[in-house]
Amino acid sequence: MATRTPSKKPKASGRTTGSGGTTKTTRTTKNAAAAIEHDFPLPVRMVRSAWMGIARVTAGAFRKIGADVHPPYEVRRDGTGLFLVILAIIIASVEWWGLRGIGWYGGFVHSVAAGTFGFMSALMPPILLVGAIRLFRWPEDDRANNRVGIGLTLLTLAGSGISHVAGGVPGISAPFDELWGSGGVLGALLTVPLAALISAPATMAVMIFLALLSLMILTATPFRQIPARFRNGYERLMGQHPEGHSAPRGTELTGEDHDQSYLYESDVEPKKSRKKIRLFGKDKDAEALAAAEAAAEYDRSVAYDTAVITDDYGNVPVNDDDAYYTDAAAEEETEPAIRPGVRRPTKDERERAAIMDSVGLGREPEADTQAMSAIDLSNYDGDTTSSMSQVPDRPAAAPLPPIPARTEQLQLSGDVTYTLPASDLLPAGPPSKQRSEANDAVVAALTDTLDQFKVDAKVTGFSRGPTVTRYEIELASGTKVERVTALSKNISYAVASSDVRILSPIPGKSAIGIEIPNADKEIVVLGDVLRSHNARKTEHPMVMGVGKDVEGGFVVANLAKMPHLLVAGATGAGKSSFVNSMITSILMRATPDEVRMVMVDPKRVELTAYEGVPHLITPIITNPKKAAEALQWVVREMDTRYDDLANFGFKHIDDFNKAVKNGKAVPPEGSKRIMKPYPYLLVIVDELADLMMVAPRDVEDSIVRITQLARAAGIHLVLATQRPSVDVVTGLIKANVPSRMAFATSSVTDSRVVLDQPGAEKLLGQGDALFLPMGTSKPMRVQGAWVTESEIHAVVEHVKGQLKAEYRHDVAPEVQKKQIDDDIGDDLELLLQATELVVTTQFGSTSMLQRKLRVGFAKAGRLMDLLESRGVVGPSEGSKARDVLVKPDDLPEVLAAMRGDDTSAGAPAPTAVEAALADNANANHYGADLVAEDLDGFEQATEYHDGADDEGSEDAWNLTGR
Ligand SMILES: Nc1ncnc2c1ncn2[C@@H]1O[C@H](COP(=O)(O)OP(=O)(O)OP(=O)(O)O)[C@@H](O)[C@H]1O
């Protein structure tokens, strides 16, 4: 507990309640000091002023080194700091710069310094400088300063002791020269009696131990964290965990460096802005009021559910409360201090948590109180940033035991033994912080802003998440909420961030929440999320690692319970990373018997890493037209599954599967069918807009059918788009895709399309997201989990090593090339010209074809239809020109495909037309394999489909007549 009672500047003492007591005391102290000062004679006062003048200039220079800091005036100790600097210079001048021989000065300084500390006197300048820097830059941080003071003193003692033992332990009465050449008087006093008692080598060991102890005190490293610190240091050195590393702002992120660069970018320099507010912080009420309306609207609609997900620091000591909780009444008598407490979830929060449970979000009731742990500043009087050391870091999570490898005997894939990837393929991330200096700076800036605008409110605590921290503000009775919300622009200004979001109130609390980006963001790695208690609690194969919420709790979600998800966000906001985390989660947790996937990746780059994994039932589909057909296949698959459910009398595929496994679902007599369970089917579309451009009506129809019915059939859709406009995410699609994940959008309109409310446009990008699971109205802010390309590669390699993909041939049926060729007939030349014209001009107009090719309307229309059938242009849009889907760069391949040339050898990226052909060839190949091999779960479905054509195999009990 700090002993000094800081005084306040009159300007900052406008608060009337809350800190009233303190203000009064500090004023008295200040007045008393002024009175004493006045009693000194003029020359003393002049010397003092001169000293303080120099001290201020020196301190100013020190405060500008590195990140600019501005400690409050009333707590500065520049005079003492200057004294230490001068002392350091004097000792350095003699011990370092060889001024020893110069007259009495050198002799005097050397005999005092070396006489006292021996060899250690050479280290005194940096030690004194460290002390000075702390006093200049962080004078208010009493706890840390005391710790550093003790550490430096111990280091000096140990250093003198070591020098003295190394110098042969001369006695205290030895000649002065001998003392100077060893540990000085200090070293002698310390080691001579000890050496007599326990021998010189043992004394050396004690001194070395003291030196190490002093380093631990200086670096605030508890014993148990030493291995972790070493590990972190090593990883940082190797570039594995980039925490604390710095790189130029706005560094373009590429490849596997993404996770590192992510940490660097920060626009927030809170302390700097504090100074500006002091200098220029006039009352900006007019501007503030203008902001109030916008803020109020925002506040009404965006309030985040924070009570949902539990913290995963399973090893947070249960006695945290005892260790850190101090009696509030006792604190009021002395100086109020920051008190980390543990908040219990409110009733409202518990109810919301129950809703979340129902949609399959990870939650761990017994850990609730840990999740709610937040830094409690309820007795913080807005005085200064407080000592970091008063609140210990979030206890480093003891590594949870590795997830035991699960090995399964697969049925659907031909009785192979399949082992899921080991959890250490996804390495752990750096430990998260519960509090950092950046948070303290923001608390000080917020307090300062409230003071400046004379708002009677206090910052009572904060919860730190990986990207943002939510600061809690409580109002004195009689203060309007609008007084704080109206300050949103001023708060942004004070913390130098345009991304400030105000929640009023925080759901379930009588407090205003202010979410401010962390200057020191943290990365959330998928491995940690998947190893969290929430993820371990269930073996459900459709559970994915989502990320971390604002309170630092791990968020996992069950895709089967969503049951369909829309993922949207501007380009670069983190969609694809999310999709990667999702697929990797599935590969980590589910066998191909449990989950099969259809991946649609019109961008052709995002999902290629997964090509060939046995969970795929068809090669990754890159052709939008084929994707539309694949969706139709999904509808058919759904119908088949429904038929089975109906025939066997089950409501959900899980029940059906259970019955199959228990041998309770038996085919009727005479049927040759071998009963096998159905895997979940996850259909992932990485860019919905591309599909909607090609066949809007078909795609919408399929999606709507699937989303309306597929839940019970175990079929789930994940639709991602960077264009969340109403023509892509139509009203019908929206109505049927209940769960949403919004990454940063480029406009508030886009945010409304995804979430039905604003908010996403204020997100920070790089995985910062609003998650709105089914059944909730208030989105939860999360930082998405991150998985690197090499991690994905390792997982995919493992999975592919277990089992080869066996693709189905009927997901995207063959395009009938022969017929197409017949279609073209004698018009090939004209068609080639038309293609060239349309692609080079990027203008799909029939009348242009008429004019340029000199053909009649009917011919031009036919050419246009041919172009559409080959994916060169989009569908007709009435009188408007059609969208051109092929880029000029791809023209040669498209023309070659039309001519029927073989373009596979050395051809670059396949065109839409080519891709279709190539994919079909693949499909046939795998189809042939399948026919020869035993039937899998999907083939049961095929049996029914085919049954209509093959009377012999039609089961009597198949009521659908397939
Ligand atoms: N969860 C995350 N944690 C850390 N950084 C992330 C995260 N997600 C994304 N990023 C960063 O943001 C960059 C862009 O992410 P991503 O490629 O997923 O965006 P996108 O929205 O899919 O963009 P596009 O639509 O262009 O593919 C990544 O390269 C990465 O550096």
Image (tube, rainbow, N blue to C red):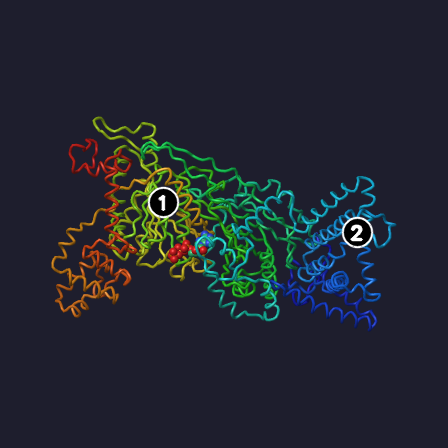
Observer able to see residue 649:
yes
Secondary structure under tag 2 reads loop
Give the structural element (helix, strand or loop) at label 1.
Answer: loop
Which amino acid type corresponds to the residue marked 2 in the rendered image?
Ser
Query: Percent from the top left, x then y, of residue 51?
Result: 76, 69
Residue at the spot 24% in from the left edge and 42% down from the top edge:
925
Q: Name the residue under label 1.
A: 563
| Circle 2 residues within 10 Å: few <14, some 14–19, many ≥20 | many
Q: Earlier in the sequence, mark 1 or mark 2?
A: 2
Residue 501: where, in percent of width, then height?
49, 59
Q: In the displayed structure, would residue 541 be above or below residue 65?
A: above
Depicted 314 relative to depicted 821: above or below: above
Pointer 2: what residue?
182
Q: Which of 539 and 37 is in front in this view?
A: 539
Residue 751 in view, yes or no: no
Closer mark to the observer between disc 1 and disc 2: 2
